Amino acid sequence: SLALYYFSASIWLAGFGAGAFLVLACLRLDLALIYAVFSFPFYLFPKQFALLGAGSKGAPLAFSLVEFAVLACALAFLLRTFLTKSADGTWRGLIARLSDWRSSLLPPLLLLVASSLSLVGSEEIRAALREYRTVILEPLIFYFLLLSVVDSPRRAHRFVLAFIALGLGVALFSLYHY
């Protein structure tokens, strides 16, 4: 579904792929986050939507695959919170895992506060806000989503393996490209 969203030329097929990914993320948020991990290398190649009147000054709307995946997972997280009784992948699961809030919550919040304060002195506020969103907010959303679904060593091991496989794949591609 992510491939259909990203590679289709038709906005209707892209919308269908986006909807399918959202439904699948609602069903299995942990697997959707693993797919989000594998979309990280595509952050420099946004999908552009040339909608009439959309965007600023006639520029098309553009979302990278990782932006879409993380925000779709966040929406699935919110839907799961209100529509299921399970603690897995919901606010209840996140709060249960934040029992020692100083070690898991304080560093990201300090980063958020420091980066928010740095926006005040920005000369190019539009570019600064875009970087703030992609470099600070979306990774923090991913971090908290990850905290909400990793409830066992087995799931943590699955995410570590996903990061290792991603690093290996990018390294092999880089060697091939070199």
Image (cartoon, grey):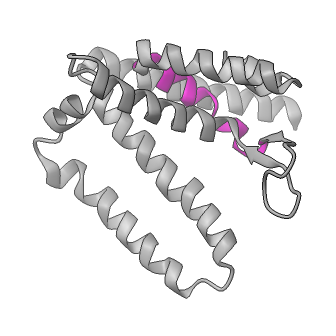
Majority secondary structure in the magenta region: helix
Q: Residue furthest front?
A: 53
Q: Is residue 4 left or right of residue 132?
A: right
The residue that appears at 42% across and 20% down in the rendered structure is 29
As drawn, 89 above or below 139: above
Let me know if residue 35 is in the magenta part: yes
- Quadrant of the image occupied by residue 12: top right
- Quadrant of the image occupied by residue 108: bottom left
As drawn, 122 above or below 67: below
- Quadrant of the image occupied by residue 159: top left
As drawn, 111 above or below 87: below
Let me know if residue 67 is in the magenta part: no
Q: Quadrant of the N terminus?
A: top right
Residue 56 visible somewhere in the drawing: yes
The residue that appears at 42% across and 12% down in the rendered structure is 27
| Rendered location of residue 116, percent (x, y) | 44, 72
| Rendered location of residue 68, percent (x, y) | 62, 36
Task: Choose between 164 and 98: the one closer to the eye.
Answer: 98
The magenta segment is: 30-46
| Rendered location of residue 110, percent (x, y) | 31, 66
Residue 89 visible somewhere in the drawing: no
